[in-house]
Image (tube, rainbow, N blue to C red):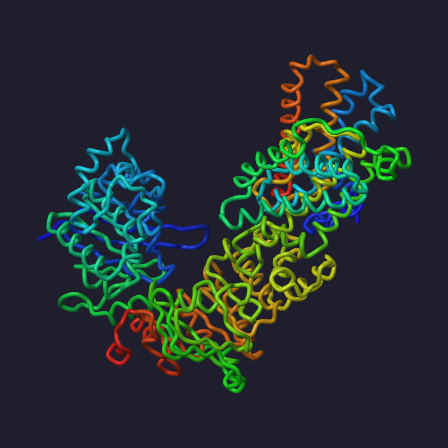
Amino acid sequence: MTQTVYSVRGVTKRFGRQVALDNVNIDIQEGSVLGLVGSNGAGKSTLMRCLAGALKPDQGELVLAGRQLHMNSMHEAWQAGIAFVSQELNLFPALSIAENLCLVPGRRGWRSAARMADEAGPVLERLGFRANLAAPLGSLSLADRQLVEIARALLQNPRVFILDEPTSALHASEVDRLHNILRELKWSGTAIVYISHFIEELLGVSDTVAVLRDGRRVTLPERPGPPPLPDVVTAMLGDKPTNLSPTKGGARETISTENPLRLTNLRGPIALSVDRMEARRGEVVGVAGLAGAGVEELFAVLFGRLPVVRGEISLPSGGRHKANSASAVANGIAYVPADRKRLGLALDQSIADNVSSVRGLGLGRDGFVISGRRQAERARQRCAATGVKMASVGQAVGSLSGGNQQKVVFAKWIEADPTLLLLDDPMRGVDIGAKSELYALIRQLAAEKRVVVIYSSDPADYIAVADRVLVFNGGKVADELSGNQLTEHRIVTSMNGSSGVSACV
Amino acid sequence: MRAKLIGIGSNRLLARVSDTSSPVARAMSLARFDEAGLLIGLIVLVLIIGIPHPEFFEFGSIKTLLRQCALVGIMAFGMVYLVSMTEIDLSVGGIYAVAVTASALMIKSGIDPWIAVLLSLFIGAALGAFNSIVTAALDVPLIIVSLGTLSVFFGLNLIISDASPIFGMPRDHLFFRIFGGEFLGLPASAWVMFAVGVALHFLFFHTRFGATVRAIGANRAAADFIGVKVDRVRLYATALTGMLCALSAAMTLAYFKAVDPSMGEQKELLVIAAVVIGGTSLAGGSGTILGAFLGVLIINVIDSGIVFFGVDPNYARFVTGCVILAAIALDRFVKRRRQLSDELQSHL
């Protein structure tokens, strides 16, 4: 019988009025892998950060081997034997691999790089990692860096090993190798917590599964053996009604067959391989897929930020597709990027400056001399139409809430009157109120005879706005869902690689 | 309205100032424009010098001051564009030197001064453009490229001038009479600086080019994302700056009617200091021509102060540096206080 080594008892964590974790109980067993799943915003990362000492729970306790923990920092967690490998790599590209392995949170002093290399050698060997340890970390691929981070954690011989999305940068063979190592670790008695969006992969390595939904632990139906995928997906999503959102009603009449977005035998530089895909004017087409499934690549190729290796793209504007973003913008393509702060907005500039940027600067449609008053007037009208709540258009965009910032991003692209809109996770960091306004805005954009292609990290968004959803897997369109098939459950199971029919519950 | 009068075109400021309704608020708003700290610093400096040395306020010394300001100021106005887009051109002194020597040599060889100066403006623009072309080709920051071209241009200057002074300009030619003299009581070069300042202020705040420069400075990745051609904008900005260096050189030649091969050395540091004192953030996105003008004034007033107080030449540089630091500190202090009060207000 295995023993509980680390337990979470009645942990609650609030951010302001929002409850991120609500009385969560989890027991982590010695020598076993606990898989933790949940949709975005379910509280997974908050729980992880509590476990790893980065956050303090408001209520409840964390008990490690019978002793209650009061951790104030991640350093203390590492010292207590809790190792954490996060999604964001905490490594130093300019230092050598060996030096990176020496830099462990909470440890003072410095082991010589040579000694470190001696110790690290076998661990890295087991991970199937072969590289000169004196080489700078920056020379490694993302996947190799991930392995270095995992190796660094393993070198501490942790009692509890937490991995947050460890495989998002890894190839299938590397994932297998990592899983084998986790199994070995487990046999030597380590308790492992494994978090991943790749549910099927997670089920393959986990002994028990814990599901979080809206900050609460959800119980899975009792079954012998590991839980099947449909059970887990149902627990993750809950019993939400799957009716179509009212904004979608009546949209079908506006669909036009003239000049659709059409991809023929398209090959991208990484994995993208689309034999045929069409999105018509007036239609909102969802493109779903896990990280690496090809959706990011599809957007980058369409917007000219990655080259087309082979095949053809015909655009709704009729223009010739070229591999640079300037001609993509000129060809009537709008791109609402996922990374709003880096690519979407100049946060220190005014709302008016941002709204007029694509039209005035990217396309140069406002002429050489720009009238500040006319620009402000246009921005005011556009912001009123997109529902930006603000004091004045002279206000810096950075002072707006996330939802209003996103509306400014929409406003600046609509100013350019695009024929194709690429929406890359447009609801990220947007509050619920603004979300429904954005849904309506997206439907309206489609109704104005534009092609809208949307990706979202929250499958509920597809249900709310998309007419149909293409599910990507391994760079290909693996499934198409529309009408009654269009449910969150179907999207998530399909993204995880099971064919639509067999995953039906 | 008031903001326009003061000469700041940023929309943010217009919005902030136009909210003011009561006279008190309006009086307060005067102290709230971006360059308020600088202006206060300048006034304090002027009083410190002028009260014990009233001759500082004589027309003659003000004219000398403005003439000195013009030489650095014309170049600094171009540098505002570069620093605003998070670039620095270290080779401005070198461009200035090549331009002044080249125009003097052309004039000596019998070319009409008007044509010689016009050609030198092209040379300045071409050298500036050269910086950007190398920057784009090698994909390294402009500051690194210009660190090299700084020496290339000064070296070029020594080669073409044979490292010796050039005299014997046709002093009676109209070019020397106009730009070496005065107009309405002020040095002609000062008028040129004002004209260039007004034009570049307009270009910066009211044209597509200026807006693009500011957008690149505010978020280069986002500007590139919407199809702004960053390399091309930088090319125009360095060419403009290079041309302004040549214009400043032409004003120098018109006044001194002679060229020394060491002219222009260390001017780049003065130009950058003036721009940075003027509140243009090295992090990009912000910057005003007016600020750079005040920065140039402050640097030159400090220089005059050192003369008026008869500071030991061995101490002069040390004192200059300390006063520059004090001016920057005062400016940041005023800005931070304003930010704090803005934040307080937005919480109420």
> Closest to the observer: A462 or A296?
A296
Tell me what residue is drawn at x 27 percent, y 71 percent.
A497
Tell me what residue is drawn at x 67 percent, y 44 percent.
B241
Tell me what residue is drawn at x 66 percent, y 57 percent.
A393
> Closest to the observer: A122 or A81?
A122
Quarter of the rendering containing residue B165 = top right
Task: State whether residue B35 appears in this view.
Answer: no
* Residue that protrudes farthest toward the right in the picture: B184
**Residue A85 percent coordinates (x, y):** 28, 48
In the displayed structure image, the side of residue A393 where residue A254 appears, left or right:
left
**Residue B291 percent coordinates (x, y):** 70, 38
**Residue B73 percent coordinates (x, y):** 73, 36
Compared to B83, does B305 lie above or below?
Answer: above
Compared to B56, does A247 lie above or below?
Answer: below
Quarter of the rendering containing residue B185 = top right
In the displayed structure image, the side of residue B306 where residue B318 appears, left or right:
left
Task: State whether residue B78 appears in this view.
Answer: yes
In the displayed structure image, the side of residue A348 where residue B27 appears, left or right:
right
